[in-house]
Image: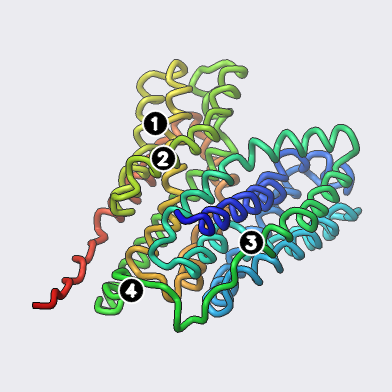
C-alpha cells in the first residue's frame, strides 16, 4: 500500500478499535453495575443493548447511502459525536427507560461508525483496491476487546461505571474525532475508482444478482449469529464439555488472538485468492472446531477456541471484500448496509436464543451452530464467480 493509504488504514483501524471497545464490548463489563444503579435486571440491560443492535440495522443502509454520496469522512465524524452523546446519556441514566434511550442513541452511532462504515469508506476512496485496507482495519480493531475490557474494568473499579462511560465519550471527542477528521476527502462520485467487479455486476442478470445478494445476506447472518453466540456463551460451553472453569476461561481468551492470527493468514496467504474461497474455508472452521470438541471433549477446548477464532477472523474480512468483488465498488455502502440488516437483527437475538440451546442441550448446542455453519458453506458453494472480462489488446 502507498504511504497515504497506509496512514488512512492506521487512522481508521485506531478509530474502529475505539468505537468497538466503547460500544459492542461495553456491556460485558458494565452491565452488572449499571443494572444495580438503575434498579433493573442484568438481562434488561442486555435487552437495551439488543435494541442498539436493531437500531444499527436500520441505520446501516442510510449511513451507507450517505457514504456512497459524500464519502466516509463526514459520516464517521458524525458517528464520533453521536457515540459521545450516547455514552454521555448512559452515564447520567438513573431509570431503566433512560438506559434504553441511551442505547438507542448508541445504536445510531454503531450503524454509522463500525466496520460496515469503515469498509465503505475505503471502498469509496480506493474502489477494488480496498482489500488490503479492509484487512488492515480489522487487524487493528481485532484488539478492541483486548483493550476495551481491561480498560473499562479498571476505570469502573477505580471511579465507577458512570465515569467510565464519560471517559469513553471523551476519547471519542479527543481521539476518534481527530482521527476521522484527518481522513482524506472522497472524490466526486463520477470519479470514483472501480474496476472489473463493477463490469461483471453490470452485465449480470438482475435475478442472478438478487439471488447472490440473498445468499450472501444469509451467510453474513449465520456468521454473526455464531460469532455472537460464542462470544456470549463460550466459557459455559467449554465447561459443559468437562473443562474446569480456569481452563474454559483461558481457552476462551484465545479467541481474540486467534482472530487476529486469522486476519494475518488472510493477508499473507489468501490476499490473491478470491474472497469466495476465503469465505468458504473460514465458514468451515466452526463446524470443524465443534467436531473436535464433540469427539475429544475437554482436552480439545483450546483447539476449539483457536480454530473457531481463526475462521471468525477471516470471515470478518470476507464480509467487506466479498460484496466488493462480486458487485463492484459503486453503491457499495448502501448495498453493504442492506446485506448486514439480517445479520444485525439475528445478532440481537443470538445470545438469548443460543443461551436457551446451551441450557437445554449443553454441548449439544454445538450441533445447532455447526449445522448453521454448514448451511452457510452450502450457500457459498451456490454462489458462482463470473469470469473476468476479456481484455482487448490492440493489434
Q: For the C terminus, which image quadrant?
A: bottom left
Residue at (66% x, 72% y) in the render: 74
**Discs 2/1, front:** 2
Residue nearest the observer in this picture, 139 or 308: 139
In contact (CB < 8 Å): disc 2 and disc 4: no
Residue 148 versus residue 8 in the image, above or below = above
CA–CA distance between discs 3 and 4?
Answer: 25 Å
How crowded is the residue under tag 2: few (<14 C-alpha within 10 Å), some, or many (20+)?
A: many
Q: Residue furthest bottom?
A: 190
Residue nearest the observer in this picture, 125 or 294: 125
- The total number of labels drawn is 4
**Discs 2/4, front:** 4
Q: Which mark is residue 289?
A: 1
Helix, strand or loop under label 1: helix
CA–CA distance between discs 2 and 1?
Answer: 10 Å
Q: Position of residue 109 (x, y in %)?
A: 69, 63
Amino acid at each position: 500500500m502507498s504511504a497515504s493509504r497506509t496512514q488512512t488504514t492506521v487512522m481508521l483501524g485506531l478509530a474502529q478499535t475505539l468505537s468497538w471497545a466503547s460500544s459492542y464490548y461495553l456491556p460485558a463489563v458494565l452491565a452488572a453495575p449499571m443494572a444495580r444503579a438503575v434498579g433493573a435486571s442484568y438481562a434488561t440491560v442486555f435487552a437495551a443493548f439488543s435494541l442498539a443492535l436493531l437500531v444499527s440495522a436500520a441505520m446501516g443502509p442510510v449511513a451507507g447511502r450517505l457514504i456512497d454520496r459524500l464519502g466516509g469522512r463526514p459520516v464517521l465524524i458524525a458517528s464520533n459525536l453521536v457515540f459521545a452523546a450516547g455514552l454521555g446519556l448512559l452515564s447520567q441514566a438513573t431509570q431503566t427507560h433512560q438506559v434504553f434511550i441511551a442505547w438507542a442513541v448508541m445504536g445510531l452511532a454503531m450503524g454509522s461508525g463500525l466496520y460496515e462504515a469503515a469498509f465503505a469508506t475505503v471502498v469509496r476512496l480506493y474502489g477494488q483496491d480496498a482489500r488490503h485496507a479492509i484487512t488492515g482495519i480489522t487487524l487493528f480493531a481485532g484488539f478492541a476487546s483486548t483493550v476495551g475490557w481491561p480498560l473499562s474494568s479498571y476505570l469502573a473499579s477505580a471511579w465507577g461505571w458512570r465515569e467510565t462511560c464519560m471517559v469513553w465519550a471523551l476519547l471519542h471527542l479527543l481521539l476518534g474525532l481527530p482521527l476521522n477528521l484527518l481522513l482524506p476527502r472522497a472524490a466526486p462520485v463520477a470519479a470514483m475508482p472501480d474496476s472489473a467487479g463493477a463490469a461483471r455486476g453490470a452485465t449480470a442478470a438482475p435475478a442472478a444478482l438478487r439471488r447472490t445478494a440473498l445468499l450472501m445476506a444469509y451467510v453474513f447472518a449465520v456468521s454473526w449469529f455464531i460469532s455472537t453466540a460464542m462470544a456470549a456463551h463460550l466459557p459455559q460451553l467449554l465447561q459443559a464439555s468437562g473443562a474446569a472453569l480456569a481452563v474454559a476461561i483461558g481457552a476462551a481468551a484465545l479467541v481474540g488472538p486467534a482472530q487476529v492470527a486469522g486476519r494475518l493468514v488472510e493477508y499473507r496467504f489468501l490476499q490473491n485468492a478470491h474472497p469466495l474461497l476465503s469465505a468458504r474455508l473460514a465458514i468451515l472452521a466452526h463446524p470443524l472446531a465443534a467436531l473436535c470438541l464433540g469427539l475429544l471433549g475437554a482436552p480439545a477446548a483450546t483447539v476449539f477456541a483457536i480454530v473457531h477464532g481463526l475462521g471468525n477472523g477471516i470471515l470478518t474480512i470476507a464480509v467487506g471484500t466479498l460484496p466488493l468483488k462480486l458487485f463492484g465498488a459503486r453503491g457499495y455502502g448502501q448495498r453493504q448496509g442492506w446485506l448486514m440488516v439480517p445479520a444485525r437483527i439475528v445478532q440481537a437475538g443470538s445470545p438469548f436464543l443460543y443461551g436457551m440451546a446451551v441450557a437445554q442441550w449443553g454441548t449439544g448446542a454445538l450441533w445447532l451452530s455447526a449445522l448453521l455453519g454448514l448451511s452457510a458453506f452450502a450457500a457459498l458453494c451456490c454462489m458462482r464467480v463470473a469470469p473476468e472480462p476479456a481484455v482487448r489488446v490492440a493489434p
